[in-house]
Image (cartoon, grey):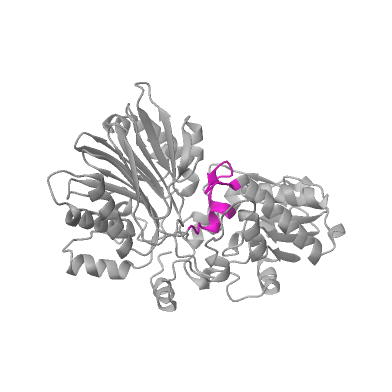
Amino acid sequence: MCGIVGHVSSSPVNQQIYDSLLLLQHRGQDSTGIATAAGDTFHTVKRSGQVREAYRTRDMRTLIGNVGIGHVRYATSGASTEDEVQPFYVNAPYGILLVHNGNLTNTRELTDELFRVDRRHLNSSSDTELLLNVLANELQQSISGADLTTDVIFDAVANLHKRVEGSYAALAIIAGHGLLAFRDPFGIRPLVLGRRMGEDGRDEWVVASESLVLTAFGYDVEREVAPGEAIFIDTTGKMTSRQCATETRLAPCSFEYVYLARPDSVMNGISVYDTRLNMGEKLARKVEREMDISEIDVVMPIPDSARPSAMQLAHTLDLPYREGFYKNRYVGRTFIMPGQEVRKKSVRQKLNALEREFEGKNVLLVDDSIVRGTTSKQIIDMARAAGAKKVFFASAAPAVRYPHVYGINMPTRAELVASSRTTEEVCKVIGADKLIFQDVDDLFDAITVGTDLTELDMSPFTGEYVTGTVSDEYLAYLEANRIS
């Protein structure tokens, strides 16, 4: 998972991009990059680590220009090295810088095509570099005269859609021309467009992974970038758009609402916070069906993303709600940390149990999901060590049984604790006295209620991949080539 942002402004954008990336830090903590354009010249700073630690005053001084893009990353494809830090650059045609959130699923075919047919060289294992080179090649093929028109740009994106499979929300700067944004034909990964008026009276634009970036800096939310759509904003602030895919349907990733997005964001017209409240209410009804709620003395969330669901569950069942864990906010999100050993070590650094809230009580812990089970087991152990008599565990998401191939770091079934186990077996593995998962239909309803949305990517829970191009052979390839 990654976070991306692009700005077109009437003043320098370096500080705006930096501040935007701070708000998107929850989407990736491996590395970060900022690039700006002043005329035909690009200025780029890319570093490993988190945003606040990565940039210095001298870096910001070099990032001149009124057009720019930024990125925060954790690795889902490619290696976790500085060579993989985005944005990626290609010098022809014109010079293009690109950042990408998502995961391409036909990387082997594209790599072969780019080498044999397009005669393009790749210098990394990143699918972002693949996407950039496909865009550059199609743009080169679409150019018929000296001028780069929006039609040429949109034709190139249309041809890209025909070649690329998987999920992708992307932003690119074309040197001397402006900012390009586009989204895959299924709208799996989020991308939202905002506008405000600059001091000179011209429109200023931002495109970002989450709406909180827009609202934090005084932009009006114009709309989501539609599945298959491309938007081009030139250096004067003129915006043009076109639908570039022949077949589209909106099937956003359900895990955005479960875990990844911040609760103060709105995605595809749906409040993440309201979704998590709905999940808590649905989960409460299942808890009520599956156990005697008089056994529960207190409901506690695993901070932070499970808090709305836990509060609503407690309210629905008229049970006491308490905060039993204190979170060290200077430790990254364990789910998106690279490597199982790093995740194991970080849990106790991240959470501390408040003993007086646990001692002698039967506690229902509520988490957003259970992926590998490692964190859940350690948290349950901490609750028992703090004096809990019994520890029940409820997941606001259904059991994660299948690999997620569209940009979330859970690509092999072997790593998923529920992939080949029943709920009772998972309960035993994590050491709970009782385990309750959300139902798949209830999660779907919790996200889509009151909306026109008819489809979600629910592949981690159902094994049904919305693009229709994910085969068993591809999943076996992912497992054989697992990075961490």
Q: Inspect the magenta stretch and tell me whether residue 315 lies in it.
A: no
Identify the magenta region.
250-272
Q: Does 221 sit left or right of 121 as displayed?
A: right
Q: Does 255 sit left or right of 382 as displayed?
A: left
Q: Inspect the magenta stretch and tell me whether residue 252 lies in it.
A: yes
Q: How many marks?
A: 0
Residue 466, placed above or below residue 275? below
Residue 155, placed above or below residue 201? below
Which quarter of the picture shows residue 203?
A: top left
Q: Does 435 sit left or right of 98 as displayed?
A: right
Residue at 18%, 61% (x, y): give it.
120
Residue 363, how many percent across, how many down? 78, 55
- Given residues 62 and 267, the one toward you in this image is 267
Question: As drawn, which residue projects farthest toward the right?
Answer: 294
Question: As drawn, which residue projects farthest toward the bottom?
Answer: 473
Residue 109, how many percent across, how many down? 29, 70
Residue 127, how many percent across, how many down? 33, 60
- Given residues 380 and 134, the one toward you in this image is 134
Pick the quarter of the image with the C terminus.
Answer: bottom left
Asked if one can make out residue 89 in the rendered structure from this viewpoint, the answer is no
Which quarter of the picture shows residue 241?
A: top left
Residue at 35%, 60% (x, y): give it.
79
Residue 263, how many percent across, how many down? 59, 44
Pick the quarter of the image with the N terminus.
Answer: bottom left
Question: As drawn, which residue projects farthest toward the left?
Answer: 146
Asked if one can make out residue 457 in the rendered structure from this viewpoint, the answer is yes
